[in-house]
Image (cartoon, grey):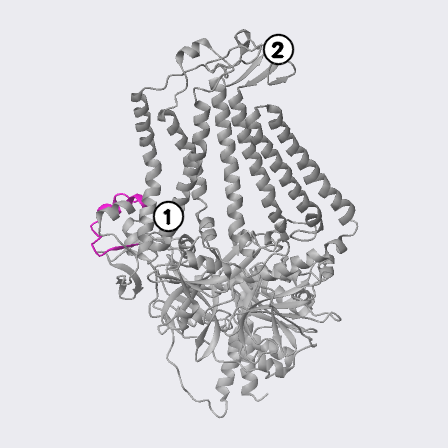
Amino acid sequence: MRDRGRGGDGGRDWGSIDWSNIDLSGFGRGGDRIPGPSRRVVVLAIVIFLILLIPVLIGPFVGFLTDLLWFRSLGLESVYLRRFTAGFYAFAVFAAAFFILALPNVYFALRPQVPRVVVDADRRRRGALPTTLRFMWLLLIPAFFFGIAGGDQWDMLLRWVNQVPFGATDPVFGRDIGFYFFTLPVLEFVRGWLLVALIVIAIGVVTLYFVRGVIGVATGSLASADIRVAGRTALALARPARAHLSILGGLFLALIASGYLLDQFELLFRQETVLVGAGYTSINARLPALTILTVIVGIAALACFANAFRGTLWILGGSIVLWFAASLVVGGIYPALIQNFIVSPDPLNKERAYIARNIQATRQAYSLATIDESAFDVGAAPTAADVRTDLSDITTVRLWDYRPLLAAFTQLQGLRQYYTFNDVDIDRYQIGGKETPVFLSARELSANSLPAQGWLNRHLIFTHGFGAVATAVGAVDSAGKPLFAVSDIPPVGEPKIDQPRLYYAELPSDYAIVDTNQPEFDYTTVQGNVTTQFSGTGGIGISSPWDRFLFTLRLGDFPNLLVSNQITSESRLLFHRQILPRERLIAPFLQYDPDPYLVIANGKLYWMNDAFTTGDRYPYSENFSALGFGSTSIAGGHLNYVRNSVKVVTDAYDGSITYYVVDDKDPVIQNLRKIYPALFKSIAEMPDALRVHIRYPESLFSIQTQIFALYHMTNPDDYFNRSDAWKIANEILVQGGPKQPIEPYYVTTRLPGSDRPEFVLFVPMTPAGGARDNMVAWIAGRADAPDYGKLRVLTFPRDRTILGPAQVEALVDADSSIRQQFTLLCGGGGASCIRGNLLVLPTGNSFVYLEPVYVQSTQSSIPELQRVILATQDKVVMTESFTKSIEALFGAGTIATPPPTTTPPPTTTPPPTTTPPPTTTPPSDIAALVKSATDHYNAAQAALRAGDFAEYGRQLQLLQDDLAKLRTATGQ
């Protein structure tokens, strides 16, 4: 037995180390007692802390109250309170959990009975660290931050509590897919939270032990120590500290073991070499390795717990070394050997079964499992009869492209500097008794463009946009400009708009105060300005001084909002008026299409948008972002599951908003409906006038087509070899510009095998890789009942070339007569040619390719439709109009020219004349036609010399019209 000395107040002998002759480093010299701060100092510190905390908390407090008032005004108070209370309860639970975990550890580390290995006479006189509440309350600080970390997970926790089954299981563990969506994220978060909390607690405990001298570090020649490094540095721990740290070490290793257990499930999302999910190596090496590591680390944790009764350090250190060694050998080297020597030499045979799982899961997760795919035997060219059947209604043929049309809308219908058009939407409407695809755009207010920027102007007078403009997709006047179906202020035309005021729109907008003493500006007439007063039910009442004070703080508009005498007891505040941000504020647990579209229904204006449920926890499903397609507007592309389960409708006048569920079979939306029953309504409750305007979402379609480009191959061998991979076809949008992928576009067309035209979103596909541009497939998303939400895929013969859009573009560029026309239109630098979407339209048993060409001169920012390119598999033409191009391809009289689809504004329309045509043409009329033709020819030559090619093209068109009239008049 070796002699033991006495050390500290604990009465224990810590060997022959003479600590009094050793130069101790700054810490580790703790004595028995350190005096705590006086009561006055503690109170003063608390007061200062609270004063500093007020400006930090006042913003969230005001934000909570004002948002609560806003949600209440929408009838959605329960939705907001559910989120808030869930976050608050989660914060309280996790903060209390940390406090409960930390308190006994800190209390044990501060016990005066714990012996010390370092005794300092001076510190012994000053006493021990205080164990009163003056010290313990400091634990509330880290508890607060750990509570915030838990409170931020309110959405995940609500989904876990209200989870629903998917009704499908994973192929490895046999668990319902809902486990991976709702339970696994919670388990992983709690495990990570506990691990960080344990590390923080352990650091705190070790620090306290050092300060108190329960753990000592010294340099010098020591006879005995628990740990010695290079014979010079010694570390000594009192036995209770060894036991305490052994327990903490055991808990740490237990959490590591639980992490290995959860990592087994993560194998189902692993990005393997040729697939997503657990492949051969994962199933046969990584999964057993994780099981072995779980057992090894679990045994090491038990050894640490047992060491609490022995108090030796080598077991604690040995357990950690064993963990590292097992991780390296079992978790790293063994799977690498299996991959390199078994899988890599024969990857297809080893991975075939797992690739099949990947294909099946991906198609299911992206709603591709029930896609309607059929072969289409493309003929050489449509017949004239096919064209009369499928393309005779010119008003439904998409001659306008949204990009040049937006510029035309802005220039022709902006009307005032403070009005603007944000974008152009496409939908279908009943015009003249028939369904017509229509481009339309809202005339929004741009407050930053107001000539006077005063508070009254921005918030009380100019409060809303006004009306919309619309044009049929094929409606063009003789000058190449759009023929408006709806135009002007107040709006005239069809579809009829009775309530044209837009208080809620796509562009960012200030708050507005309505029902004030100040009339709102409405529009201008020749007699002067017309004013209006808001008569809707929306908005937040601000008759209470307290509410006005809150919103003054919230909006930072002092003192106008607080003291203005224009505000009455009936006044209401409209804010959160931008469509997309307000949708995200109401339901942040959904993903949204970035482009809400305008709908005219029952004489009112609405905004309709698509909302999606997404996830990245569907086993074996491909992650969209991992395919290298880039980001998408839905969840940034970080998803492997998506459903378009909700349509969001906002009244553009009063701001009322409704979330309609269109896919009640989606387990994720079922989960959300359990959480927020007051938020969602069934699609059956949507008014019919709105339901007919539901479209297939472009964002979803873009994701699905890019996934299907690879996952249409259901044979694992084909998938592995990428032998039939597709890509979205390319097109050229600017004359002489580069190729770029075609954007999906909406058209009205008759699908092969269908007996009626329908509104679809489609895109053509070409082979992936290499320089091949032939078309191999055509994908359409159907928008009309009863086929809404279905995908239709036409695949084409492999034994011959079916021209793709880029090949048609090449034919256009190679045609000498077309090149000559482009040179005349935009080759002189005075104008530019814009090529619209190249449409691939099913016609008979083949396709007609259509590409509009717009000319925009440097002197005018209004693009004009000047040419229409049409092509078949063996011929391409470009003429001044769609009708003439059809005749050039299929013969004169193939289709008739319809009357214009327009409602002209009454102020600019001359009274009609009804002079009957004479039976013979008088010579004077013929002379007039000859003079008119000569004038147009001279004007064309003058425009050509001036470099105004747009005017040159227009005069040539007028000349051709005069010559046609002359031929008719002279009987030629």
- Quadrant including the C terminus: bottom right
In the picture of the structure, the residue carrying the numbered disc 1 is 85
Q: Is residue 38 above or below residue 147?
A: above
Q: Is residue 565 magenta?
A: yes
Residue at 55% across, 79% down: 756
The amino acid pointed to by label 2 is: Ala
In-image side of 347 versus 460 (left or right):
right
Magenta-colored span:
552-573
Pinpoint residue 803: horizontal percent, then vertical percent.
Answer: 69, 69
Magenta-drawn stretch contains 278? no
Instruction: Give the SS element for disc 1.
Output: helix
The 10 Å Cα crowd at callout 1, few under 14, some 14 to 19, many 20 or more, is few
Rendering coords of residue 697 (x, y %) = 51, 63
Residue 228 appears in view: yes
Residue assigned mark 2: 223
Q: Residue furthest top?
A: 21
